[in-house]
Amino acid sequence: MDKILVHGGSKLSGSVTISGSKNSALPILAATLLTREECVIHRVPDLSDIHYMLQILASLGAEVERASGTVTVRADAVKTVAPYEIVRKMRASVCVLGPLLGREKEATVSLPGGCVIGDRPIDLHLKGFEALGAQHRIDAGNVKVFASELRGGTMNLRGKLGPTVLGTDNVMMAAVLAEGTTVIESAAAEPEVVDLANFLIAMGAKIEGAGTRRIIIEGVKELHGAEHSVIPDRIEAGTFLVAGAIAGTEVTLRRVNPEHVVAVTDKLVEAGYRIESQRDRMTIHGNGDPKALQLMTEPFPGFPTDMQAQFCALLSRTSGNSTITETIFPQRFMHVSELKRMGANIQLEGATAIIAGVERLSGAPVMASDLRASAALVLAGLQAEGVTEINRVYHIDRGYELIDEKLNALGAHIERVKA
Ligand code: EPU
């Protein structure tokens, strides 16, 4: 298994181009199943999660071609059972349910289990499908959703931990081909939901309100092919802003949407970092004396759970006492024990991390447990003395395109050791 060695202490400067968003590209690729016609998707990042999605599309019968960042899909005829062998590798596989249900009136995928960031149920997805007239059956580890016909319905997709991103996506993808009007109340408003809605609209769907808590969909008879460019990855952007905060003199992000990262930049500015934003570029300046922060993860436009681990790394070496409360995945703190092995002083009280900034972190062998936790370990390694050896780096390759090469181009010293 590959390892990453981060040699701490280098200063970062220069510019980095942000890739297309993983969490936009995954449901958008699934949505290509809604039409027989060709769809062309640009700025698809080269990540293992994307490869799994392309494999699922191919196994469902779609013709899939990839040429650098552009993926072309033609799903002339589709099967409705997604194979366990690929599905089990990625929870986001669940987002083929919506388009297959919309097009074929039935779909089967294996039920996602829990994962390291916590329990990952799909009850809200199923509740939404039910409101469209579908039923479901769970059998031998698979969930099958089916309907004789899909008709518009009104539903509230708020769960006890807030709205659901992929649940909103899934229901939207089924409802575009349902008869009549669907209203999703308490919809997720993340930019990735808006990007998917824009792609569906380009395919001929009638959707209003994406990006707000109420989405209204008027069903159409069929969708056609479309071409679309995926939005920049706001979590990759946030991660590079934190890298700039931790180790940068001056780091510029290109091809970023500053409006998508406001919750992150607000906190960095509150800590004392200077950030300049233009239309699609942002620059963060280092600060020798940042301030501690109190923050809480929330659905968009609040502070993203996908940036929580990276801020744990940043605040580990920020003097004073910081707190981070995780409200979306209350158990998403696997990175804490690894950061503590590097010398961080973090106590967990329920879903709150209490971080007392320390003067130094020291490199150590550490284990990546999930995607954002591994990004946090890379960030901790940048500011640690000595070498941080990160094992199980396949986690980072699921969601960051060439993170080691991009950081090295900014002046970091990171080696990838092939097993
Ligand atoms: N939830 C339910 N029932 C459901 C669905 C969700 O109770 O049917 C709960 C979840 O357990 C969680 C909360 O609702 O407590 C929010 O989960 P959500 O459904 O929004 O998460 P998701 O759609 O499965 C996406 C991203 C995650 C990101 C979350 C929250 C993709 C592929 N994944 O997951 O990204 O953390 O939204 O913003 O879009 C990552 O990129 O590292 C990642 C984990």
Image (tube, grey):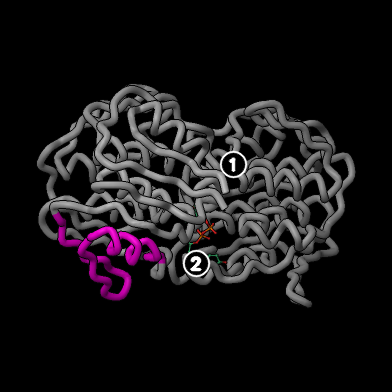
The residue tagged 1 is 47
Badge 1 or badge 2: first in the primary sequence: 1
Q: Out of 2 and 105, give the one closest to the viewer.
A: 2
The picture quadrant where one finds residue 258 is: top left
- Rendered position, 160 above or below 328: below
Across and down, in percent, residue 126 comes to: 66, 67
Residue 169 percent across, percent down from the top left: 60, 51
Which secondary structure, mark 2?
loop
Q: Which residue is at a point 38% across and 57% down the rendered structure image?
A: 365
**Could you classify mark 1 by the number of other residues whose Cα lies within 10 Å: few (under 14), some (14-19), or many (20 or more)?**
some
Point out the stretch of residues depicted in magenta: 332-358
Q: Residue at x 30, y 52 (%)?
A: 363
Amino acid of disc 2:
Val
Residue of label 2: 116
Along the line of sight, which residue is nearer the eye, 144 or 406? 406
Name the one closer to the observer, 188 or 408.
408
Taking 255 as reference, is 252 left or right?
A: left
Q: Is residue 187 left or right of residue 57?
A: left
Give coordinates of residue 286: x percent, y percent. 19, 33
Query: Quarter-wise, where is residue 264 in the image?
Result: top left
Q: Secondary structure at mark 1?
A: loop
Residue 205: x, y in percent?
69, 39
